Image: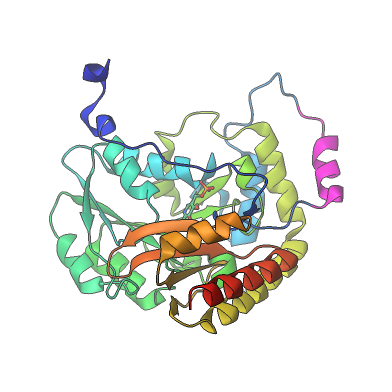
Amino acid sequence: MEKFVRAGVRQLVPYQTKHMPECIKLDANENPFPWPAEMQEALFKQKLAFNRYPDGMGQELKARIGKYTETSPEGILIGNGSDELIQLLLLTFGGLGKSLVVHPPTFSMYEIYARLTETTVVQVPLLNGLDLDTKQMLKVAQVPEAHLMIICNPNNPTGSLFPKEEILRLVRESGKIVIVDEAYAEFSEETLIPEIKNFPNLVIMRTFSKAFGMAGLRLGYLLGQPKTIALINKVRPPFNVNSFSQRAGILALDYLSMYQEQIQQIKAETQKLQEALTMLPNLTVYPTRANFILFKPEDPDQWASELLKRGFLVRNMGMLPSLGKCLRISAGLPEENESFIQAVREISNGMK
Ligand SMILES: Cc1ncc(COP(=O)(O)O)c(C=O)c1O
């Protein structure tokens, strides 16, 4: 049957996801705090017409997101997680003969959806694996085929936060569609949202999966000028976000102050983990502005397996440009982080 498969799909290796509920999960940059019982009850108590299609326009949710982000609902597009939004962006602006500029190491789904939409990927590696090469990105974006670029800020997996001015320079000088993936912006507390009004080519992508602890419900959104959002809306499936997730998003925003406390706690936990890792010998720890940390022990594969033996699931990033083999962990619950710190000390001692 392979001969019937599109060329771009034939070469794809399916995205590997790990489901190991028995482990302490530090591999997916999620919010480790479960939804409080009171919030879950409030969600389940709502009367939802499951026999009816959801509100395809997501009006109530968009009104709430608009309030949260201080943008107008016409400049919002909701999606079934950012994953779907990346796909919609490439369906709108990419395609055969067009190219997408990315800055590896970064989130792998950009390239996967580029391939699925037959969009050429132009890689401009981060300088020293950490900093934007703005000049080179502008250079490669000059050709007419270059239609879009995606900046991940803070960047997954490095945790780097790029200077606003550099990103704005890309937006201003390239004139191409510049997508800024702000999946972790609630942790970095920096955003380019206020710049949307100045640039029709700036699109910001956000998710409820990280700070809002809704990875299991799949909800994300794009922010842009209404005319730009209207273009992307042409390719959006009419009922792409289910009723339950829409209600959950609205409810999460009702509990904003609780999340703000959680975010501060997660930031403090990330810092605690960072300090503990920095104390270990023969290990490089990269600075982070997100809820995860990239680090490079001498033998990352052995570290990953030692951690797994002790019940910790971490992300083995494999070979990253300029940085080599690294591991990435996200901040867990305080008690999980305590036992993780003990485990890494033990592993490090064992390797002396
Ligand atoms: C940078 C970045 N963007 C987007 C996503 C995907 O988010 P979602 O759960 O909304 O699909 C992730 C998930 O890890 C991510 O790291």
Prevailing secondary structure class for the magenta stretch in the rendered image: helix
Name the image quarter holding residue 270.
bottom right
Name the image quarter holding residue 98.
top left
Near-viewer residue (332 or 288):
332
**Above or below, 88 relative to 303:** above
Please check the rendered image and state whether residue 298 is part of the magenta-colored stretch, yes or no.
no
Please check the rendered image and state whether residue 38 is part of the magenta-colored stretch, yes or no.
yes
Query: Going 40% across and 67% down the picture, which residue do you hit?
Result: 299
Residue range of the region highlighted in magenta in the rendering = 36-48
Query: Going 50% across and 42% down the picture, which residue do you hit?
Result: 17
- Where residue 287 appears, as percent x and y from the top left, is 47, 78
**Above or below, 301 relative to 37:** below
Query: Going 28% across and 64% down the picture, which residue do you hit?
Result: 321
Near-viewer residue (40 or 33):
33
Left or right of 168, for residue 185? right
- Where residue 181 appears, as percent x and y from the top left, is 44, 58
- Where residue 83 appears, as percent x and y from the top left, is 46, 43
